[in-house]
Image (cartoon, rainbow, N blue to C red):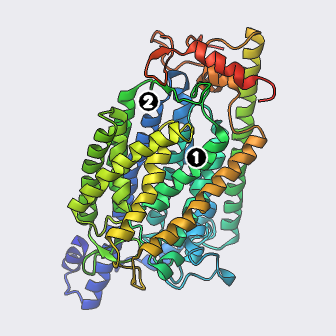
Amino acid sequence: MISSIVSPLLAGTEPTIQELADQVKLDSQVLTEQFYFYTVVVMWLIHVGFMAYEGGVARRKNLMSTAMKNILTIAVVTPSFYYFGWYVYGCFEEGWPKSGHASPDALPGFCGLTAPWSAGLGPNLQDHVSLVFFLAFLLFSWTTGSIMSGALIERVRLSAYLLLTVVLGSFVWILDAAWGWSSGGWLVTRFGFHDAIASLVVHGVAGAFAFGVLLNLGPRIGKYDASGRARSFRPHNLHMTLMGLMLIFTGFYGFYAACLVIQSTAFPGWLNIYLSPTTLGAIAMVITFGFAGGFTGGWFASKGDPFWTLSGGLAGVIAVSAGADVYHPSLAYLLSASGGMLAVWAGGWIERTLRVDDAVGAVAVHGVCGFYGVFLVGIFAGGYPTGINNVPVSFGGQLMGMLAFLPLAFLPGYGVSWLLKKANLLRVPPEVELEGIDLAEFQQDFYPEFERVPEVIVTPDGRAVEAGPILLEDYRAVIRPGR
Amino acid sequence: MFDSFPYDEWSEDIADFWAWGGANSTGTYIMVALGFILMVAALYGFVILERGKLERQAEALRGAAGAGPTPPANPTGTV
């Protein structure tokens, strides 16, 4: 705005109305550009957080292999999202690209700007928005990969994870975003599907994809005893895990902000992803009360367990994200408390009843609560007009989105991991898993100054015992011919 | 503010220079193709490099222990 005042003064002339209008337009575009740029900076903290979170949960022998997954997510998702992921978002909104790659009706010209050779994805002094908008979505893509990452730690091959995260981060999630998280998506324009801050399209989908992978990956050696009861591995550094979660939470403010569209020259200045009006303050209140309710629910449902208290905060926010643009803070507080509780109960059910070894509870926190969040909008925000067609939110519309996205996420996760498993490329050899992946991948221990203590495992009845004999026994069962 | 500067002409020149031909040009197509090839090659490389490391380590562990791998509680820190 300063330039529109200073420019005519420097020139010594009275500006015309047209000149002032051009200045305001340019200032607005630069404001938008700065806004998305800084959301990207803040969202980096999500990935710092995921790295610390998962690294802390891992046993000492798997620390660096766990962290390296988060780092190399950036190395593979960035180019793949650039070369084809963004095109999927721009051109698949109505299901499949139109003939001749014409843009969706809701966003004229958008499809053509999403190809990597287009003016929208290269240096272009006339376009302040396309590249930063792309970057914000790229950070969302990294997030989907990191959500899956934690579930698979301590036995998945790094390369298998990277291939899976390309499928998830650069195709699966962005296809569902095109369908249900854009103003022209067919679920939005036809059914009023409403998931304002991505409960389902980011979190739920990543959780469902991860669940499909976990079914093929199998549990860590020693996770279940002969009768199928779950043992627990001790995190090697719970402080690091909790700090990582707090960093994720900090990054979430950037994530929430990046889900909005600035329209600084028209009331009320902000739009949600469906181009319906909202404010930054409204969603910031919901996220804050979401943490408060989620921590509370997680604390009580887990009887004060530190890990599940913080995970409950994450689950609480995810449970209210879908309606963050319309919820009252008190409603967000109530609903997020239920989300925090749900995550704890779902995590226990997945681990003990389904016998699926999700090392960080990602399926419960992101998957279950992601779907739960969209479900809640159908109840508590029914009738709210969504998108450029103003289609009212309805329970049926929300259900349609859930029914579309569950197979869209689960089947690719299951299918690709099944192929990797058949090629013996999904899981590290059992000998390497037992000794620790870091020694195989990096030939070193990453706490060289610290004395090693015997690894401990917690039995189903809650006793902490030395892990070595249990792991060796389970290893022998794993390598036994015929299994 | 920049009325005295040939802004439009200058920006077109810069855009062409930055993109080695601008949007939808042969130069840009070639760069995109090369980048895509690097991405695919890197993914293939991640798989091959890791497979070699894991197989060597697993083989060493099987060979060294005979009856089984070293107990996990006390890795040596070196291979």
Which residue is most to the right? A481
Labels 1, 2: one chain:
yes
Which residue is most to the front? A227
Q: Secondary structure at mark 2?
A: helix
Q: Which residue is mark 2?
A: A56
Between label 1 and label 2, give the one nearer the viewer.
Answer: 2
Residue A464 seen in the figure: yes
Chain letter for mark 2: A
Which residue is most to the bottom? A17
A360 versus A273 height, above or below? above
Q: Residue at x 25, y 56 (%)?
A: A334
Q: Secondary structure at mark 1?
A: helix
Q: Give the Cα separation between the discs numbered 1 and 2.
A: 22 Å
Pick the front one: A144 or A45: A144
Q: Residue at x 76, y 15 (%)?
A: B62
**N-terminal-most mark, 1 or 2:** 2
Q: Which residue is mark 1?
A: A75
Query: Disc 1 vs disc 2: Cβ atoms closer than 8 Å?
Result: no
Kind of residue indicated by mark 2: Gly
Q: How many marks?
A: 2
Residue A469 lies in what quarter of the image? top right
| Quadrant of the snapshot with the C terminus of chain A | top right
Kind of residue indicated by mark 1: Ala
Pick the front one: B5 or B73: B73
